[in-house]
Amino acid sequence: MTMVAPAPPSSPLGRLRWALADGWTVTRRDIIHWIRQPVALIVNLAFSVMLVLVFGYLFGGAMSVPGGGNYREFLLPGMLVLMMFFSLESTIMAITEDKSKGVTDRFRSMPMSPSAVVLGRATADMLMSVITLVALVACGLAVDWKINRGIGLALAAFGLMLLLRFALLWLGIYLGLMLPNPESVAAVQILVWPLGFLTSVYAPPETMPNWLGTIAEWNPLSSTVSAVRELFGNPGIGGDSWIAQHSILMAVLWPVLITVVFFPLAVRRYQRLSR
Amino acid sequence: MVDQPAVLAEGLIKSYGEKRALDGFDLSVAPGSVHGLLGPNGAGKTTAVRILATLLRLDGGRAEVAGLDVARQPALVRAKIGLVGQSAAVDEVLSGRQNLEMFGRLYHLGPAVARRRADELLDYFGLADTGSKAVKSYSGGMRRRLDLAAGMILRPAVLFLDEPTTGLDPRGRNEVWEAMRALVAAGTTVLLTTQYLDEADQLADRISVIDTGKVIAEGPPSQLKSTIGGDRIEVVLRTPAHLETVVGIVAKVATGEVESIVDDRTVSAPVSDRVAALTEVVRALSDAGIEAEDISLRRPTLDEVFLQLTGHRAEKKEEVAA
């Protein structure tokens, strides 16, 4: 049996075909992870569901939504966005682990498409985000969360959340390439969690001290949360500040800004591996 | 073309800021041979391999692998090489077979061919029974063998092995050595880096000794060993009183310079015929009525090799000056 690698394609179309085929092979690696470790996948999803239940029922009774409305209906859009944000950690972890174990070097020493590593990571993480959203939406519908403004706007809301996830992908890849080893990911978690809580996810910024409310309002997550609440027709939108009034615009602008900054940084960092 | 080296490096230079990791590194590896790159941590072994495997850009010099320029044709070089790094670069969750299939697909083998090749390699490296188990459950030796298998998917023209047994227990090391011998028998050109003298000795046809980014000695293991003296005899005395006499005794059997350390009451020297040297020294000591605390034969440590090699160079310079 001959074992000759085909020559690398010279045409742009051929390179694209390699990138897509190799990217899919890399994505499939993650899918095999989910199939081989269903427990890890379920625990991950159960964690998100548990957060919804804990905040919805444990604290929900004591919370009031400005302008009235059900707290769980207020909470769920926030939780969906929060899960998009927390999955940043899994991107960082995957990148750092591959780098420190030499898997990234093995990929780089192979005649595969150079962009496939990132493309495969991106596809796998986006797929996982869709699965997370589906699980949380199912849980939400069970605790009387509702889509009030029709399926079209609801799809737009999901689009905005995945846009945020897409932007965080590049931040995650950049940070993952920066960190020396998987152990140091814990340090990033310490920064990630406050950022996740300092938002309009659990409580409306109007109810916070002025300065804290302003920070929470300008947190990119809050823009997506507010926009998604508006598109689902859930309670809790409002606020008089400019940023609160333009949440849908900002829910597009923030992710675009994050991508514009961190996509080139991530690419540069990856190329610097050969320095 | 027959004589074209499989790996060629001429005056490679690689700097990290002020520090020169490679400083005029030269190497030529004949096709079908095993070349050992021997040196301590930080000597530049890994940097050299990473440049040759297209993972690092070089700052100066020229490198060719399988007749292809590493800097100008990295994509073509990658189709000709296999790389096995210092840690097992395989997916822990995937099974051994799934790992090999994935890498096979990334080498652009069709699904059926990739599967067949994975089975072939599992067989070849003695992993057929555990091929369906997650790599997490593998021993260190098994992981490295899977790592070797992944490097062999395309039957590469050149296989780079960067410290393939570092961190393994003796059993794991033996497993990897066996696997490497099989590869070598099949005619693969191998560039092997190692910190272990006996590993290079066991596996390599030729050895380059590297220190501070330069090759300081090159040749077949037998030649290098005779240069550095192979085994050493070491005599530890009870008192330093008779040190000079003992130096004289040891000098009679030594094949190189005799070293004596007064504070440690130790005299040592390279010898070629182990048993004869030991017998001779023991008899001479007892004839002279000198009591030794310990007499031993041992292989030189890497430190001693370097001391010896740099020592020889200095001596040669002095000869020229004189």
Image (cartoon, rainbow, N blue to C red):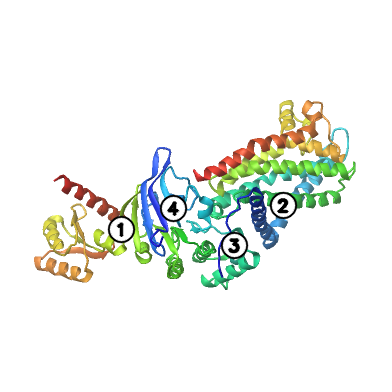
Q: Residue at x 64, y 35 (%)?
A: A261
**CA distance separating discs 4 and 1:** 32 Å
Residue B64 is labelled as 4
Kind of residue at disc 3? Gly
Label 2 to label 4: alpha-carbon separation: 43 Å
Q: Earlier in the sequence, mark 3 or mark 1?
A: 3
Packing grade of label 2 (10 A; few <14, some 14-19, many >=20) is some
Image location of residue B312, percent across then percent down: 22, 52
- Image quadrant of residue A194? top right
Tell which residue pokes out farthest to the front in this image: B1
Chain of the residue that carries numbered disc 3 in the rendered image: B
User: In front: mark 2 or mark 4?
Assistant: 4
Residue picked out by circle 3:
B104
Q: Residue A192: x percent and y percent? A: 65, 41
Q: Residue at the spot x=31%, y=63% of the render?
A: B221
Above or below residue A63? Residue B169 is: below
Mark 4 element type: strand
Q: Which mark is residue B301?
A: 1
